[in-house]
């Protein structure tokens, strides 16, 4: 038997519970963000789930080529500088192709930008943006444990121009970014667009988008066209695709 957790909102709670076949669970409500804890006799696999039995160091050692014996992942940033990541709950341990895609797309674009990282997870993309010369960075995530993980990684890397916090509409209304980074699968992106419709009105923005399966490329390009985004670049890796758009 394993113990699992997923984080969601009221809008998606019932659908996720039904999809997973969960009947008995414990719910923790933190200002509208729900953490659902439950046990299962099955070995469940889902992008929405976090196993509470995970040894994060062991996971990173097995799956990330950047994991080192000091307990950190070291990602080379150039100029003899490594980005350090402590294994933990936040997504982005440099083992998934979409994280590497997003980093590659960001590298030549981020200098001098005011960056909003939506779904910041471990903080890897925000931290990279800062190291590569972003003017200012705000990383937001729905999961308070991911935010805590990102803030630990911020302290480890001793960077000053980044903030990590819970997803909050007030931040989006007041931050005024020049670049928005989103590395999420399309179902999670759908929640973002529904939860923050004001994103659709942003103009003069560089969008760095990943988390799109290669077979979803044409559908996503139609979505971008309807929003008035202009494709600048796309990049593929291991069945996934990332984009740079301007709006």
Image (tube, rainbow, N blue to C red):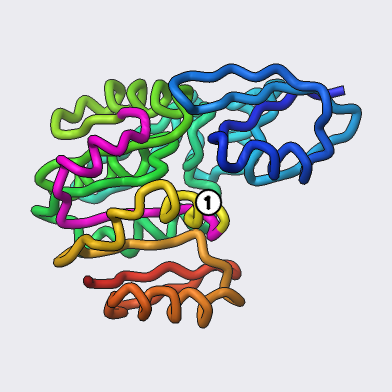
Label 1 secondary element = helix
Please name the residue that numbered disc 1 is placed on. 188
**x and y, in percent, of residue 126 in the image:** 29, 42
Q: Nearer the viewer, residue 135 or 193?
A: 193
How many other residues sit within 10 Å of disc 1, few (<14), some (14-19) or many (≥20)?
some
Q: Nearer the viewer, residue 111 or 191?
A: 191
Residue under the point 52% across and 58% down:
97
Residue 83 percent across, percent down from the top left: 32, 38
Q: Residue at x 48, y 74 (%)?
A: 220
Describe residue 145's horizontal placement relative to residue 25 as left or right: left
Name the residue at 65% across, 23% down: 55
Closest to the observer: 197 or 21? Answer: 197
Q: How many marks?
A: 1
Any part of residue 100 in sight: yes
- Viewer can see residue 70: no
224 to 172, vertically: above or below: below
Magenta segment, which residues? 165-186
Residue farthest toward the right in the current orientation of the protein: 41
């Amino acid at each position: 038997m394993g113990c699992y957790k997923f984080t969601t909102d009221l809008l998606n709670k019932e659908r996720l519970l039904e999809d997973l076949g969960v009947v008995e669970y414990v719910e923790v409500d933190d200002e509208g963000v729900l953490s659902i804890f439950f046990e299962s006799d099955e070995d469940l696999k889902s992008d929405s789930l976090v196993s509470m039995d995970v040894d994060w160091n062991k996971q990173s050692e097995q799956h990330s080529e950047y994991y080192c014996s000091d307990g950190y992942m070291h990602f080379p940033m150039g100029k003899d500088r490594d980005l350090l990541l402590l294994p933990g709950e936040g997504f982005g341990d440099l083992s998934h192709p979409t994280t590497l895609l997003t980093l590659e797309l960001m590298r030549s674009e981020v200098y001098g930008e005011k960056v909003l990282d939506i779904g910041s997870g471990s903080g890897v993309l925000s931290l990279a943006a800062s190291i590569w010369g972003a003017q200012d960075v705000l990383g937001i995530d729905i999961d308070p444990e991911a935010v805590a993980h990102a803030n630990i990684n911020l302290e480890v890397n001793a960077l000053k121009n980044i903030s990590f916090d819970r997803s909050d509409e007030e931040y989006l209304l007041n931050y005024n970014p020049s670049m928005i980074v989103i590395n999420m699968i399309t179902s999670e992106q759908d929640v973002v667009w529904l939860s923050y419709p004001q994103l659709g009105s942003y103009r003069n923005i560089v969008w760095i988008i990943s988390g799109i399966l290669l077979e979803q490329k044409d559908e996503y390009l139609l979505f971008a066209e309807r929003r008035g985004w202009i494709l600048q670049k796309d990049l593929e890796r291991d069945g996934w695709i990332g984009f740079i758009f301007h709006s």
